[in-house]
Image (cartoon, rainbow, N blue to C red):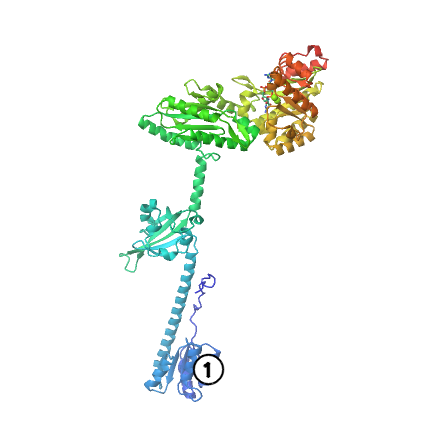
């Protein structure tokens, strides 16, 4: 038998649905007999062909198929037995009825041995002969049909075996004792058994230990019909002797099983006998693994592999219940790295990520097995200490954490120093609600940060402010733009030599409906984190451009206006267009607009930023490096950007009185001048600072010594006075 499905496809049936006339060949050398037979047969609906001798008969048989042959034995040219032999050779399934005058028993036996279907003696009874012909034809037809059905059965069985064996599912039958009577070939790739190996083995051989009890009812299913087992998940065990389980994806397979009991129904409808079961198991291992991954991702932080907030809440819930039963206190810690954002922004996300991994590992070292360490997001971790004796236990662990984290971390050649602020609260003393406890620990942590970082604080009932303020700020920020609560203030940048106003820096303020005028430190970090900074930054660009257009219309001197750009804004794909739009709407000269970007921000996505700023530079827009000196970048990289201005950070200016700062500032100014840049010193507060900067040939100064940031109205007045010849002598403006 061929295994090829196409060759073994079931043949189409050849039995015609319509009864066809039977064709008979009548052979006799006696013309009278031949004629008599023909006449007799004409009374029935046969198609009759005659042959008057053996040779004639062979010719007729060679030409066409007959349903039966009536054959005389004694013929002069070729006797009947020779014809019989010829028929047996050529068309064995054509029945031959010998009609002979030889009435000896020998003749009959010989003819029947030679393959004759029947033997009729001459002279025949016409009715008898017709009946014998009819019988032979019927028997012949039944035989043919039987053969045909058998053939189809064999084909169909082969076809089904092929389907079953090439099925992607594991298919089996069990006997009434639960032993395999059939398994398809799929079992080999699924479980590592050859199908013969499993035959007559008990099914429990392939069931995972933990599922044996369940399998008893489903794998070995006795129910049939609607109540049988459908899509039941069960685990199967792979062949333990298999050499390479890895190829099969582990030692255990998850399958979805549909099984049904088989009953012998021959005994009658009321007396069914259970004879075994039949089942189909679909391999769902990959789907289960995918589900597990999704589940894992839903409950874990992907970077560190630590539990996330959801899993932390789960653990806390369980432990709270246990703590209640055992009347034992537990503690929740909230940990936040100090200044992580600075490291992340300046050294890049990859270094930031590795740092978080290292921190996670170090924290783990400080904890016991039953403690839960989770990463709640960003640089915020949480710890659950489920069994405590006292608060001093918490203090002890936190001291250890603070100390372990104070050792430098080495990442990609950087030596990084970090510290951690910790807030703690204890249940049931401080409450026993999951979210409240987490929030209280966070509030205490923010408090620890505001008290100087790198310390532990326990939550106290008065501590609401900092955290809820932060939440409130984010909510308010989202409404502030629509309510027009933002304003720009303008701080002049003054020529060190002449005292003329060269430009202004636009500084954002927020008129908060309840809290009054807020400076960027109060809301920019939250705006950055939440992404609201992008639309706010866009507003700043438009507002600053509108101000320049306003001054131009009023005929005031053309000055430069600097606008601060934040990380999210620069990263936004719309950034370049947003700047260009602002300039075009107010038909400004690009040179009047300067973008202030910190060097660490520039370095963060070097290539992308170089492209964006290149496009803006082509439109004339100027670029200033803000807070210069606080970043980590080298001049070599900075020179790849189209920079016009260096703004020396106020931290250097304010310590100008110390000698080592003098030489640093001196070097910065010299470098800036050497690169043909406009150098601006920020945060100049005293006359001595101004004098030193002037001496070091710093081009411009910005700071309280001239003016704090001014309202639009005040800045306009200042420019107006300038236009009327505001003199060097009176260059101090009190802001
Ligand atoms: P910055 O760009 O370095 O701005 C200079 C900051 O120094 C301003 O604080 C300014 O008021 C302050 N300052 C000026 N002169 C003196 C002085 O003599 N002494 C001292 N101690 N400080 C002085 P401000 O306005 O609070 O802004 C803080 C930071 O907020 C800015 O630093 C800037 O990075 C950011 N910022 C301000 N406006 C915007 C804005 O529109 N968008 C974005 N993204 N950031 C802004
Ligand atoms: Mg600035
Ligand atoms: Mg600055």
Q: State which quarter of the image contains the C terminus.
A: top right
- Closer to us: 597 or 675: 675
Q: Residue at x 41, y 50 (%)?
A: 282
- Closer to us: 116 or 670: 670
The quarter of the displayed image where residue 718 is located: top right
Residue 214 x/y as whole percent: 32, 46
- Closer to us: 128 or 433: 433
The residue to which callout 1 is attached is: 58
Label 1, residues with CA under 10 Å away: few <14, some 14-19, many ≥20: some
Is residue 181 depicted above or below 373 in this figure?
A: below
The quarter of the displayed image where residue 430 is located: top left
Please indicate, yes or no, whether residue 343 appears anywhere in the rendered image.
Answer: yes
Please indicate, yes or no, whether residue 440 appears anywhere in the rendered image.
Answer: no
The image quadrant where one finds ligand 3 is top right
Which residue reaches farthest left? 271
Which residue reaches farthest top? 729
623 horizontally vs 275: left or right:
right
Is residue 214 depicted above or below 15 in this figure?
A: above
């Amino acid at each position: 038998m061929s295994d090829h499905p196409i060759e073994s496809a079931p043949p189409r049936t050849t039995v015609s649905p319509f009864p066809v006339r039977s064709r008979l060949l009548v052979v006799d050398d006696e013309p009278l007999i031949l004629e008599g037979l023909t006449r007799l047969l004409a009374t029935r609906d046969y198609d009759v062909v005659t042959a008057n001798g053996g040779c004639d008969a062979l010719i007729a048989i060679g030409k066409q198929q007959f349903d039966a042959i009536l054959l005389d034995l004694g013929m002069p040219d070729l006797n009947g037995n020779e014809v019989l032999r010829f028929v047996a050779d050529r068309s064995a399934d054509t029945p031959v009825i010998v009609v002979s005058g030889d009435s000896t028993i020998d003749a009959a036996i010989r003819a029947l041995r030679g393959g004759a279907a029947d033997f009729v003696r001459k002279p025949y009874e016409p009715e008898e002969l017709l009946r014998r012909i009819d019988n032979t034809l019927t028997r012949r037809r039944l035989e043919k049909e039987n053969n045909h059905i058998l053939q189809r059965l064999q084909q169909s069985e082969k076809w089904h075996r092929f389907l079953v064996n090439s099925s992607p599912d594991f298919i089996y039958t069990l006997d009434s004792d639960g032993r395999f009577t059939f398994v398809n070939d799929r079992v080999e790739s699924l479980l590592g058994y050859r199908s013969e190996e499993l035959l007559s083995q008990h099914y429990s051989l392939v069931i995972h230990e933990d599922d044996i009890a369940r399998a008893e009812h489903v794998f070995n299913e006795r129910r049939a019909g609607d109540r049988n087992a459908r899509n039941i998940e069960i685990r199967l065990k792979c062949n333990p002797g298999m050499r390479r389980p890895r190829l099969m994806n582990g030692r255990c397979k998850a399958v979805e099983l549909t099984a049904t009991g088989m009953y012998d129904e021959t005994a009658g409808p009321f007396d069914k006998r259970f004879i075994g079961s039949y089942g189909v198991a679909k391999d769902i291992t990959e789907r289960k693994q995918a589900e597990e991954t999704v589940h894992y991702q839903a409950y874990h932080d992907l970077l560190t592999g630590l539990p996330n907030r959801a899993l932390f809440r789960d653990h806390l819930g369980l432990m709270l219940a246990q703590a209640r039963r055992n009347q034992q206190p537990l503690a929740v810690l909230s940990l936040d790295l100090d200044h992580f954002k600075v490291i992340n922004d300046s050294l890049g996300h990859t270094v930031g990520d590795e740092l978080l991994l290292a921190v996670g590992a170090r924290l783990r070292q400080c904890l016991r097995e039953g403690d839960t360490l989770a990463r709640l997001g960003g640089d915020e971790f949480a710890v659950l200490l489920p069994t405590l004796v006292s608060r001093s236990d918490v203090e002890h662990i936190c001291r250890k954490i603070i100390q372990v984290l104070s050792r430098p971390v080495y990442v990609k050649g950087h030596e990084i120093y970090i510290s951690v602020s910790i807030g703690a609260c204890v249940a049931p003393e401080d409450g026993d609600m999951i979210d409240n406890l987490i929030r209280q620990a966070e509030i205490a942590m923010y408090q620890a940060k505001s008290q100087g970082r790198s310390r532990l604080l326990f939550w106290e009932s008065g501590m609401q402010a900092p955290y809820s303020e932060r939440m409130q700020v984010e909510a308010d920020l989202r409404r502030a733009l629509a309510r027009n609560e933002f304003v720009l203030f303008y701080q002049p940048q003054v020529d060190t030599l002449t005292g003329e106003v060269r430009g202004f820096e636009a500084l954002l303020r927020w008129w908060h409906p309840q809290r009054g005028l807020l400076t960027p430190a109060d809301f920019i970090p939250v705006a950055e984190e939440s992404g609201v900074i992008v639309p706010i930054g866009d507003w700043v660009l438009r507002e600053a451009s509108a101000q320049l257009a306003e001054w131009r219309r009023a005929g005031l001197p053309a000055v430069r206006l600097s606008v601060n750009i934040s990380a999210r804004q620069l990263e936004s794909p719309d950034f370049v267009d947003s700047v260009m739009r602002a300039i075009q709407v107010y038909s400004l000269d690009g040179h009047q607009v300067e973008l202030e970007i910190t060097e660490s921000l520039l370095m963060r996505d070097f290539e992308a930023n170089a492209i964006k700023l290149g496009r803006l530079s082509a439109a004339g827009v100027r670029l200033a490096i803000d807070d210069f000196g606080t970043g980590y970048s080298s001049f070599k990289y900075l020179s790849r950007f189209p920079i016009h201005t260096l703004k020396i950070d106020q931290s250097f200016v304010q310590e100008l009185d110390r000698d080592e700062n003098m030489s640093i500032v001196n070097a910065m100014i010299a470098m800036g001048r050497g690169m043909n840049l406009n150098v601006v010193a920020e945060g100049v507060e005293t006359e001595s600072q101004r004098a030193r900067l002037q001496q070091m040939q710093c081009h411009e100064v910005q700071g309280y010594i001239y003016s704090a940031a001014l309202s639009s109205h005040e800045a306009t007045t200042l420019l107006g006075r300038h236009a009327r010849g505001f003199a060097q002598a009176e260059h101090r403006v009190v802001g």
